[in-house]
Image (cartoon, rainbow, N blue to C red):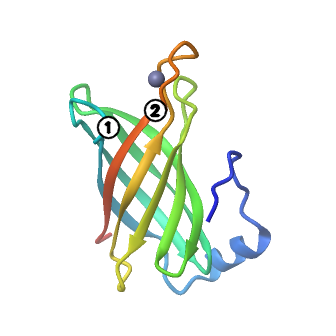
């Protein structure tokens, strides 16, 4: 499954599926552990995610810095293939427009997803590193 560098637009069919989905949007939360940084910091995400057919979309909030408690609003979009999900987390700010990309495996009851995530370098054009990333886990929580 390949992620497009452009924010995908849900097709009319996908929108319809989401509207008619037997499972309503669920609330998910969990941590993104930054294994590529020396500090091993982690981000926390809480999001409403809808999955129907191959469509995956959502919106939520991400804490980027546990110390200052800063939250950014994010949009999620991606695809589901069997138990494999891949999605992009789009940060709604101008400072960090670059998205995270995530791939994960859903548990059979669709209550847990575990996988890996990557982000591009945020240090500007002079830095030529490949960015970073780590592992993440999201759990469905009761509404
Ligand atoms: Zn860099």
Quadrant of the image occupied by residue 64: top left
Q: Is mark 2 within 8 Å of ligand 1?
A: yes
Residue 11, how many percent across, how many down? 77, 67
Instruction: Residue under label 2, please give it.
Output: 131
Foreground pick, 36 / 60 = 36
Q: Left or right of 35: which side holds 108? A: right
Residue ID at (54%, 12%): 126
Q: Secondary structure at mark 1?
A: loop
Give the mark, 1 or 2, whose residue is nearer the N terminus.
1
Mark count: 2
Q: Residue furthest right?
A: 12
- At horizontal 21% and vertical 30% (from top left) the residue drawn is 39
Vertical placement of residue 80 versus 29, above or below: below
Disc 1 designates what residue?
36
Which quadrant of the figure contains the N terminus?
bottom right
Give coordinates of residue 94: x percent, y percent.
58, 25
User: Alpha carbon of mark 1 to alpha carbon of mark 2: how far?
Assistant: 9 Å
Q: Residue at x 68, y 45 (%)?
A: 5
In the displayed structure, 98 sits above or below 105; it is: above
């Amino acid at each position: 499954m390949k992620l497009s560098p452009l924010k995908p637009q849900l097709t009319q069919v996908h929108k319809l599926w989401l509207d008619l989905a037997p499972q309503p949007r669920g609330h998910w939360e969990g941590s993104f552990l930054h294994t590529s940084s020396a500090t091993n910091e982690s981000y926390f995400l809480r999001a409403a995610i809808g999955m129907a057919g191959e469509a995956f979309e959502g919106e939520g909030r991400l804490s980027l810095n546990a110390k200052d408690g800063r939250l950014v609003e994010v949009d999620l979009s991606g695809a589901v293939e069997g138990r494999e999900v891949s999605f992009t987390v789009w940060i709604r700010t101008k400072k960090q427009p670059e998205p995270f990309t995530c791939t994960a495996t859903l548990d059979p009851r669709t209550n847990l997803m575990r996988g890996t995530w990557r982000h591009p370098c945020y240090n500007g054009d002079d830095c030529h590193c490949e960015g970073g990333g780590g592992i993440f886990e999201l759990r469905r929580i009761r509404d």
